[in-house]
Amino acid sequence: MVLQGQIVDISNRRIYKGEISIKNGKIASIVERNHNVDHFILPGFIDAHIHIESSMLVPSEFAKLAVAHGTVATVSDPHEIANVLGIEGVEFMIDNGNKVPFKFNFGAPSCVPATNFESAGATIDSDGIKQLLEKPDIKYLAEMMNYPGVLFEDEEVIKKIAWAKHFNKPVDGHAPGLRGDDITKYINAGISTDHECFSYEEGLEKLQKGMKVLIREGSAAKNFEALADLIPEHFERMMFCSDDKHPDDLMLHHINNLCARAVAKGIDVYKVLQMACINPVKHYNLEVGQLKVGDAADFIVVEDLKQFKTLQTYIDGELVFDNGTSFIKTVEFNNLNNFNCDKKQVSDFRFESDTKQIRVIEALEGQLVTNELKLDSLIVDGNLVSNVEKDILKMTVVNRYNNANPAIAFIKNFGLKEGAIASSVGHDSHNIIAVGVSDEMICKAVNLIVESKGGICAVSNIEEKVVPLPVAGIMSDKDGETIGKQYAQLDKMAKQLGSQLNAPYMTLSFMALLVIPSLKLSDKGLFNGKDFKFTSVTID
């Protein structure tokens, strides 16, 4: 097979008219040849850190959508399914991903459970990490979210990092807001990347101390604008990633959108493409072609180098996307799950108190970090309730692995004026998380999730919608287009109920992520991520 186009040679910073020949999935030759083809040929895009599960799609269905945007590979942390099903879940992701022509590069999830302050469905200790890292399909030790464990030299944490070093595989980081001597110690432990920087200064310090910084732009956490100005000087040590991307977003764009935005800012296109196409291959030792003779024929044809609209995507010489059509097939698989709680009663969500003030989680648009607010309470018949007028809503996290009392807290900025929303996508343990205007609505939403053995839903006095997620309670068994449309309808309903958030379900899913400060809620109670300990909802 022979293709003609404008060849984009990123490392030598040149574009020339040429011809590529492909044989047995490899690039046999690249020669300069004059022709009239205007389209550009360049290496495929790589998402340098993503949880495939957050797309609510199994890997094979994720791939079907991703190739439409020129993505040929991901660096994938199967942390979400691991928290539900352990090593069995990781093996499911690898097996499903191997059935389609797409280059998933999975890591060994380092923090299962993420903390000891929540109930997860599984545990992966240092022996489990060794078992995973021995596999050639496992390319790295995934994000070390337990940064206190690194700083205080927790024995299990240090053993996990030691196994990664033993197998000569990189260690990914996760250290939001960590600065000064603490980030120095964290880096010196052997941790090489961070995708959690939310300010220019934080990103610069980590780069200067030897870390590689990933610019994240997901459905909820968006750090591109804060970090883009680092690219011109530090592009050799930077990459692009999504971290968490919902299916409706994935239908629209992927890493190609970050490239377009960076070029629109006037950033040199070769620097942008090195981040998107080259740096992940080098850092993670990926078997992904870089448009060189002898490489795997992993490349894309784009309309221009401004919008990066993908016309064709090739992986191992196979045409997997062509002018609007994805050729990746749906594969069969068996659903696996871990969902063992019963339906709840409205009385389970009462919070009896006479306190005048409460601690409130302040959700922030485009961020995973939250603030702690101290606000006046609203009490009805001895029960702390949602104050809809002031947008202080009751929130719950319900253990889905065992029957237990729901944990209760309060949150601001969800903006619901009626009803409730709920999800069993609740990072990182994936218990049921819900927020609503009343105990009755919250109970109704939670029970919809229980009945479906996992999913996302919205309820009002007159309507209820649920998208079941039967694969581990976090992924659909349907195709990407179907789940994307269903999710978009649910997102629309949440906004009709009053939410002003850009991605209310994605934001909701992170309100139980204890390793991101300041205030979060686990199934065991309200948690202060700065002090790394539980705190009280009520203020005496």
Image (cartoon, grey):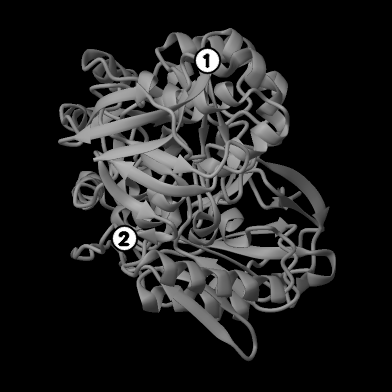
* Residue 108 spot, x, y in % from top left: 29, 33
- Quickly name the residue at label 2: 472
- Residue placed at 26% from the left, 28% from the top? 287
Amino acid type, residue under disc 2 in the picture: Ala
- Residue placed at 34% from the left, 23% from the top? 31
493 lies above or below 283:
below
**Quarter residue 105 falls in:** top left
Q: CA distance from mark 2 to mark 1?
A: 38 Å
Helix, strand or loop at label 1? It is: helix
Query: Is residue 143 rendered to the left or right of residue 176?
Result: left
**Quarter residue 35 falls in:** top left
476 lies above or below 187:
below
Q: Residues within 10 Å of mark 2 (few under 14, many from 20)?
A: many
**Foreground residue among 393 and 366:** 366
Please identify the residue farthest to the bottom as the structure is shown.
Answer: 462
191 lies above or below 501:
above
* Residue 322 spot, x, y in % from top left: 38, 55
Query: Is residue 483 rendered to the left or right of residue 414?
Result: left
Disc nearer the start of the sequence (2/1): 1
180 lies above or below 366:
above
Q: Residues within 10 Å of mark 1 (few under 14, many from 20)?
A: some
The label number, if any, that marks residue 56 in the structure image: none
- Quickly name the residue at label 1: 236
**Foreground residue among 202 and 261:** 261
Helix, strand or loop at label 2? It is: loop
Circle nearer the viewer, 2 or 1: 1
Q: Is residue 75 visible?
A: no
Amino acid type, residue under disc 1 in the picture: Glu
Count of marks, rendered view: 2
* Residue 417 spot, x, y in % from top left: 76, 75
